[in-house]
Image (spheres, grey):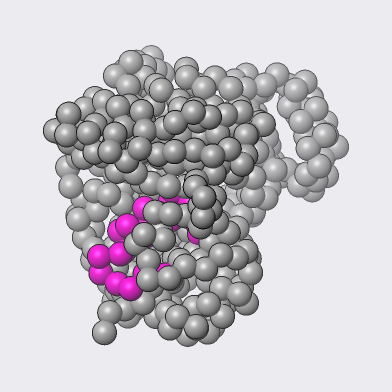
Amino acid sequence: MSESVLVIGGGGREHAIARALAPDCDLYGFASNRNPGIASLSVGTETGDETDTDGIVDYAETVGADTAVVGPEASLQAGVADALNAAGVFTFGPTAEAARIETDKAFQREFMAQHHIPGTPGFETFDDADAAADYVDKTGDDVAVKPTGLTGGKGVRVTGDQVTHGEAVEYIRESGHEEWVVEERLVGEEFTVQAFVHDGDVLPSPAVQDHKRAYEGDEGPNTGGMGSYSDARLTLPFMTETEYDRAVEILEATVDALPEYTGVLYGQFMLTAEGPKVVEFNARFGDPEAMNVLPVLETPFLDIVDAAREGEALPVPSFRPEATVCKYAVPAGYPTDPDAGAEITVDESTIEAAAAAHGGEALLFYASIDDRDDGLYTTTSRAFAVVGLADDIATAEAIAADALEAAGDGLRVREDVGTAELVQSRIDHMERLR
């Protein structure tokens, strides 16, 4: 009898997770939206609050789920993994306490300092917004200011880059958050390494570079991520193998201090002139970064999950030597004033034609789409992503760019993700810093 696996979450990340699991199990989905991509892969789906632990456990028991994989950070913070494990459903995702490495940024930094995790930036924590604002107002150094809780990847402001000191002070005072982390501004190139973790095993995937800013040329407000790219090897073009290895060593040191951690640990790093420093940790796959690494994962993802469930050593994952470029289509006005409730069309034949034209592969991942009986509609978040896969980044980008012609009216794309010009600018930046 096939294993039954429940995936919690309905975004592009979870569609990628579902696609990686579906060939080897009976798949079920639970999310706040009906993701058509996940639904097409599933035996059944349920719509509900992704933080409703009782509702999720009830659904898992109703469908006889053996295993669960949790996608969203809010679900982890709510204790969904704890509740499912307590109900006898093994969950590949950390407990609420272990997930504090993401969900509580003050805890994250204090944990790193306490355990002497390499790459920890200088920081101060505040439990009062006025005190944090006064600190930023008086310091002459450029800083990053972060609310301690979850902000969907949109809560950070960096002086000397995104805002002035005065604007940062105003942001802190008017945001409504009381608890803050203020830390040194890190200068370099950001990248992510995601690792499968269980019982001390730390098995990393290829490095990915995400693009948070809304518009071309890294302009505009932060978003949940407009797109990302990876190379046909573990490293990215602007980094050395030694720098990648140092990032993995940081993940290993973190897991050594978190011995009960199970799931994916995502390290967001800044590659500085002195080497990688930690921007943040996440307690789950990234979105969009999951869509870069899971499609090139040759080892069945379910084998990794099942090894964790059985208390065995995780199999060393194998990745196809292919580059990937992921580009998101988002509602008009995203992220500040997104046009929710607009009907959209997605021409899947265009995606297939793009792959054929360039001799590679193109994948479609639905994200925060409202799949109604009469069509597909936008929400306030990202609509869908396409991923080009090829022997090199340039060809993968060409596939993704052509495939995004599938996006109809009312959607916007950041066109420069993965382009040769953008990648070269990253290489040049690091050469100047070094």
* Spot occupied by residue 69 in the image (x, y as percentages of width and height): 43, 66
Residue at 32% across, 41% down: 348
The residue under the point 45% across, 27% down is 413
Please say whether residue 176 is one of the residues in the magenta stretch.
no
Q: Quadrant of residue 265?
A: bottom left
Can residue 200 be seen at all in this image of the molecule?
no
In the image, 348: left or right of 410? left
Residue 232: where, in percent of width, then height? Answer: 20, 37
Is residue 288 positioned above or below 405 on the image? Answer: below
Count of numbered badges drawn on the protein: 0
Q: Where does the image place residue 42, in percent across and percent down from the top left? A: 37, 66
Asked if residue 425 lies left or right of residue 257, the reply is left
Which is more toward the observer, 309 or 17? 17
Magenta stretch bounds: 9-28
Q: Is 423 located above or below residue 181 in the figure?
A: above
Residue 89 lies left or right of residue 79; in this view the side is: left
> Which is the main secondary structure of the residues drawn in magenta?
helix
Taking the spot 54% from the left edge, 83% from the top edge, the residue there is: 86
Which residue is at a point 30% across and 58% down the rendered structure image? 20
Quadrant of res 394: top left
Which residue in the rendered view is the most extreme toward the right? Answer: 130
Front in this rendered view, residue 297 or 413: 413
Furthest-left residue in view? 359
Residue 17 is one of the magenta-drawn residues: yes
Residue 416 in view, yes or no = yes
Question: At which x and y percent is residue 272?
Answer: 44, 28
Vertical placement of 75 versus 350: above or below?
Answer: below
Q: Quadrant of the C terminus?
A: top left
Determine whether, in the image, residue 342 is placed left or right of residue 230: right
Q: Is the N terminus in the top left, top right, bottom left or bottom right quadrant? A: bottom left
Say which of 71 and 40 sits in front. Answer: 40
